[in-house]
Amino acid sequence: MRLAERLNSFPVIAVAALLLAGLFGFLIGFGTTGKAAPTIRQATLDTNSPAAVGRGGPLEGSSLTPRERGDTPRPDGNGGRSSSPRNGGTGSTSSNPGAGSGNSGTGTTSQPIKTGEPRKLPQGRVDPLVTAQQTQQAQAAIEVSVRDANGNPLPFALLALDVNSGPLGWQLVQKQPQAVPETRGVFRFSQLYAGEYRVRSLQTNYRRAEAVVQLLREDATENVSLVFEPLEYSQVEFFVRFEDGEAPDEVELRIQRPDQDDASSNGRFGKYADSGAGGVSRGMIPPTRYRQRTAGGGLVKLTLPVGQETQIDFAARKAEIDYQANASVTPTAGVTQKEVTLLPTEPGSEGEAMNGTVSPGKLAVTLTVDGKEASFTRVNLYKDVNDFQYRPPSTTEENKYVFQSIFAGSWFLVAESAGFHAPFVQAVDVGPETVLEIDIKTGHLRVNAAREPGTPDPSGGEARYRVRLRPMGSGTIERAYNGNLTGKQSDFIDFIVPAGPYDVRVESPENYAKLAVSPVEQSFSMTAGGEQALNFTLSAATTLKFQVVDANGQPIPNAEFLLTFHEAGAVPDSEKTSVEKAGHDGRCDVPIAPSGPVYLMIWTTSTDWNNPDKVLQLDLPAYGTKDLGAIVVQQ
């Protein structure tokens, strides 16, 4: 009994357990090749990205074992998920094997990073920085008197103001006029600089009216009158019916008036994205939308201006299916009649009715990954990869997905799996009975993030960065992952992605120190079993401010400028998309400018890409603000 008690005692059991564990580990190690596995980083899904809502982390819940996936290394050995940094998670904090930094799991290391040699710009043209000690004040004004054809003042008026911006022509001034107190029908645009302006009417039901005004002094007030002449109208009768001849009880109308001139998006080297909120703020007449009951035979009566082309979109719903049509009409005196046929549409068609005969379709698709069965978290059909709306499968059986009650034609199949990081996207043609077997081939993408030499860590914060993967250039089905450069000179994230074209964008996450990225975006095409590496350089961002003026301190409206590391005459054409435009007051605010040495190029009168009006060399502080003041460009 004593011997049995000793064998059952805790020390003896603990020693035996340790011996068994060591023996088991030896056998496992003996059975391996001894070759080190490739180092693969796990990417951390950015759950704060709108596209990531409701999705699992990378390889979360994957049913594919490493052996089933083949020899291609996969990120995430345990299928786990890290929390988002904003929610207290650590993000991707594993160190780059070649960086020489440790991994504490918190995104920082005990060893400071090496500062390295600061960036050196190539030798090139550099102009002296000349600033105006005194600049003109925006004290000029334009008062607009608005009257109807009978000379009666109008108490309400929609007006737009443009400024002549040299080579860019008329550019919208983001100002709204104020009614002059106790003066009926007079509206005032205030706090303007001297220059040439154009006042335009945006008033519906009246013919277009405009006037050009020259403000010669900074304290001048010029008066201008606009006469609003009412448009002549006539009645247009639309007979709206479905394909089978049945008339809808109600239709939704979208009436687009004739376009107004709006050149505000024009630039010397391309067009700018329209950032205005609403048609009136952009200097354009917004479309009119409302619902209307139809009369007998689907009759819809509209009163439209004579002699002006008007676009009308019609929409109705029948048996849970959306129908749409569009018509263009130029009314004449008297009554104009027009037939309109509503055709079925699908989600994601952006309101564009299908042309021709629409036939029903059905799709049954079986999906595998690299020749192996796999599980998928989401499989949907999109009419457009840039639309958020999608069609889920009607039935799902293992890895087979069936879509019924859809229309024949072109669709985009989008599949998501824990086995790869970016959604798989493929265009498919759907017929009455379409059966497809698709094997999703994957490849390995490495995104390298290198810190610009000399860039310090942010004070009291972390150097986080975000990688956005956009299959087929889509921004609606992209996925975003976070990485961390804190305490490291370089970092990388590995991704397993389906074969196909991609845009990869790197940026700073919200609520973290801003980092300037070069280049911001790169494109590539992954091949089956391919290996791709993309390199991005990150530096501390600077908030840069300046104003562009002439020798008299007069602001130059809508000057264009570029921050670049290339000398004048050698800037690649690809950087034309990075050109920015100043405001109507010549002011330029860049919230994310790269710190360190950089070229600032400014165009005011020149339209030559290789010959800006002014080239400056700056040394911008890390994580700080640099205000250059009023830069004199035109002597």
Image (tube, rainbow, N blue to C red):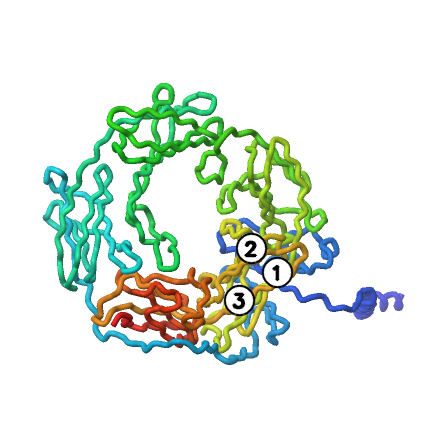
Closer to the camera in the image, 615 or 484: 615
**Above or below, 2 relative to 430:** below
Is 170 or 434 nearer to us in this picture?
A: 170
* Front one among 65 and 574: 574
538 left or right, relative to 77: left
Q: Secondary structure at mark 3?
A: strand
**365 sits to left or right of 117:** right
> For residue 591, which quarter of the picture?
bottom left
Mark-to-mark CA distance, 1 and 3: 13 Å
Amino acid type, mark 2: Tyr
Q: Residues within 10 Å of mark 2 (few under 14, many from 20)?
A: many
On the image, the x and y values in percent for residue 26 come to 82, 68
Amino acid at the residue labelled 3: Phe
Query: Can residue 224 be seen in this snapshot?
Result: yes
Residue located 46% across and 66% down the image: 572
Give x and y (percent) for residue 207: 21, 39
Q: Residues within 10 Å of mark 3 (few under 14, many from 20)?
A: many
SS of the residue at dot 2? strand
Residue that carries the numbered disc 1 in the rendered image? 445
Q: Residue furthest top?
A: 296
Marks 2 and 1 in Cβ contact (< 8 Å): yes
- Asked whether residue 590 appears in the rendered view, the answer is no
Q: Earlier in the sequence, mark 2 or mark 1?
A: 1
User: First in sequence: mark 2 or mark 3?
Assistant: 2
Identify residue for label 3. Answer: 536
Q: Which residue is mark 2?
A: 502
In the image, 173 versus 98, the foreground residue is 173
